[in-house]
Each structure stands twice: as C-alpha cells, then as structure tokens.
Image (spheres, grey):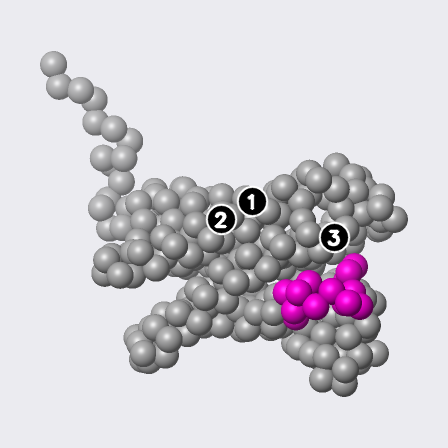
C-alpha cells in the first residue's frame, strides 16, 4: 500500500529553493556582521597594545607596562622581560594579520600576500602561545590555577590548530585548510574574547558579579577562562555544519544565534573600548 505523501511534497520546489536561498543569505549576512564587529574590535585592541606598551617601550619606560599588567616588567629578569615584550609585539601583529587571512577577496586577488601573511601569522601564533605559557607559569599572572589551566589549554589548541592548518595547506586540501585556519583564528583570539566577555558581563550586571575583583578569582572567571575559546569554537562548528549542509530552519536558527552573540560581543567591545582601551591610549 503506497504511503501517504509527506507535507513537504505539497510544497513547490521553487518555494523550497527560495527558502533555502533566503536562509543561506541570512546566515552569510550574520557571519559578515560578526566578522566586521570582530575585526573592528581587534583593531582597537591592537592599537591599544601598540600605543600603550609600544609607547612605554620606545621611551624606555618599561615600568609603565606594570600599570595594566601584573609582572609586566621585572627588574633583573631579562629572559622574562624579553618573553613579555615578544608576546606583546606578537599579540599586536597577529591581531592585525589574522583577520586578513579570512578575507576571501585577498586570497583571490593577492594569493602571494595571503601565503606570506599566513606564514607570518602561523609563526607569530606559535611564538605567542609558547611565550604566553612561559609568562603564565614561570613569570606569574593574576587568577588561580583553574584559570591558568584553562588558558594553557587555549595555548595548546593554538599550537595544535597551527600545525593542522599548515599540514592541510601543504597537502593542498584547501577546504580543510580554511576550516582549520578559522579554528586557529578563534583560538588565537581567546585573550581578546576574554576581555570582551568580561566587559559584557560587567555591563549586564552593573559591576563585578561572580568573582572577586581584588584577587581576580571566582566562578565566573573560572568559567570564562575556558569559554573564551570553547564557546567561539562551538559556534563555529554549528555555523560550518549549517552552512555546508543544514536545512533552512537550521540556517535561520544559526543566523539568529550568531546575530545575537554578535550584539552581545558588540556591547563588550564598546565597553572595553570606551572604558579601558581608548582612555589608556590617550592617557
């Protein structure tokens, strides 16, 4: 006995195609919205690093690093000071270079620039991760062991993703290379997501909540030490699955979620820029 026709069979193929196309357009627009907000926020953060830390360094006032960084400059600790300087320099460089790697127009119009910038980005990400681990465990940092473990796992993921990104490029598996490059970009941006997430949390709660600002410890900061990279990576996986083979409802859902998260991120960027980054650049 023939089965009853499904509800979908009564929907014209043109309407189904239109729905899928509309969902795909919405998802692409949401991704562009997120990317634009991220690039803008990271440019401000990179400028803040260059102006504040670079400005003190150029004038030989390395003690000025301690104004906003614990153990920024320790007299007599040449190795540690060098590691800190390298880490700060690389943080600015990879913030500027990372976004360029994800611009499809650059890959298409200037592939050589894309390749050389990618090599510099990979090397910078690896050195930044290694110097960050050194600073965290041997130099000293705020927070507790739970936070330090979370941040260290972030650095390990940077090293892993950098290796996989390079491997897929050498294998000429461009599709996989781009996916790993996006994961690397998010992992490298963990320190930035931490600051933006913290500023959003402070804005929503009207001040510190779920942690002690004096000791910089507490359940929310422990959560954020892992969420700073795991949450963006989880959202990326959802986006990739929806983009590459998701149904129209799945794409609409992902587009809505991504847009809401971008708005929240935008709040964090605005609060961080106005309350922390820009004032110290002019101060």
Q: Between marks 3 and 1, how big is the CA–CA gap? A: 16 Å
Which quadrant is home to the C terminus? Answer: bottom right
Is residue 200 at least partly visible in the picture? no
Is residue 72 located in the magenta-colored stretch of the structure?
Answer: yes
Mark 1 or mark 3, which is nearer the start of the sequence? 3
Q: Nearer the viewer, mark 3 or mark 2?
A: 3
Front-most of residues 200 and 176: 176
SS under mark 1: helix
Mark 2 or mark 3, which is nearer the start of the sequence? 3
Q: Residue at x 74, y 52 (%)?
A: 141
Residue 30 as seen in the image, left or right of residue 78: left
User: Residue 92's quadrant in the figure?
Assistant: bottom right
Q: Which residue is mark 3?
A: 141
Disc 3 and disc 2 in contact, CB within 8 angstroms: no
Location of residue 250 in the rendering, given as x and y in whole percent from the top left corner:
41, 42
Front-most of residues 173 and 81: 81
Front-most of residues 136 and 251: 136
SS under mark 2: helix
Q: Which residue is mark 1?
A: 153
Disc 1 and disc 2 in contact, CB within 8 angstroms: yes
Front-most of residues 211 and 247: 211
Location of residue 70 in the rendering, given as x and y in whole percent from the top left corner:
79, 59
Q: Is residue 78 above or below residue 230?
A: below
Residue 138 as seen in the image, left or right of residue 237: right
Is residue 128 located in the magenta-colored stretch of the structure?
Answer: no
Location of residue 127 in the rendering, given as x and y in whole percent from the top left corner:
52, 63
Q: Between marks 1 and 2, how big is the CA–CA gap? A: 6 Å
Magenta highlight range: 69-85
């Amino acid at each position: 006995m023939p089965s009853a026709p499904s509800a979908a069979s009564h929907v014209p193929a043109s309407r189904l195609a239109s729905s899928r196309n509309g969902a795909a357009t919405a998802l692409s627009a949401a991704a562009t919205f997120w990317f634009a907000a991220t690039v803008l926020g990271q440019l401000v953060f990179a400028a803040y690093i260059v102006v504040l830390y670079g400005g003190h360094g150029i004038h030989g006032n390395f003690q000025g690093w301690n104004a906003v960084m614990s153990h920024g400059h320790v007299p007599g600790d040449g190795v540690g000071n060098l590691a800190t300087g390298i880490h700060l320099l690389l943080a600015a460089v990879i913030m500027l270079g990372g976004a360029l790697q994800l611009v499809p127009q650059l890959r298409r119009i200037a592939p050589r620039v894309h390749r050389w910038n990618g090599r510099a980005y990979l090397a910078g990400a690896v050195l930044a991760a290694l110097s960050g681990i050194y600073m965290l465990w041997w130099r000293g940092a705020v927070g507790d062991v739970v936070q330090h473990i979370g941040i260290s796992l972030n650095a390990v993921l940077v090293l892993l993703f950098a290796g996989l990104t390079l491997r897929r490029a050498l294998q000429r598996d461009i599709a996989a290379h781009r996916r790993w490059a996006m994961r690397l970009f998010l992992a490298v941006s963990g320190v930035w997501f931490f600051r933006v997430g913290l500023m959003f949390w402070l804005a929503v709660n009207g001040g510190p909540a779920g942690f002690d600002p004096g000791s910089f410890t507490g359940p929310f900061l422990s959560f954020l030490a892992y969420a700073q990279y795991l949450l963006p990576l989880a959202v990326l996986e959802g986006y990739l699955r929806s983009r590459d083979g998701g149904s129209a409802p799945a794409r609409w859902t992902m587009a809505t979620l991504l847009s809401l998260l971008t708005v929240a991120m935008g709040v964090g960027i605005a609060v961080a820029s106005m309350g922390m980054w820009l004032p110290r650049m002019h101060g």
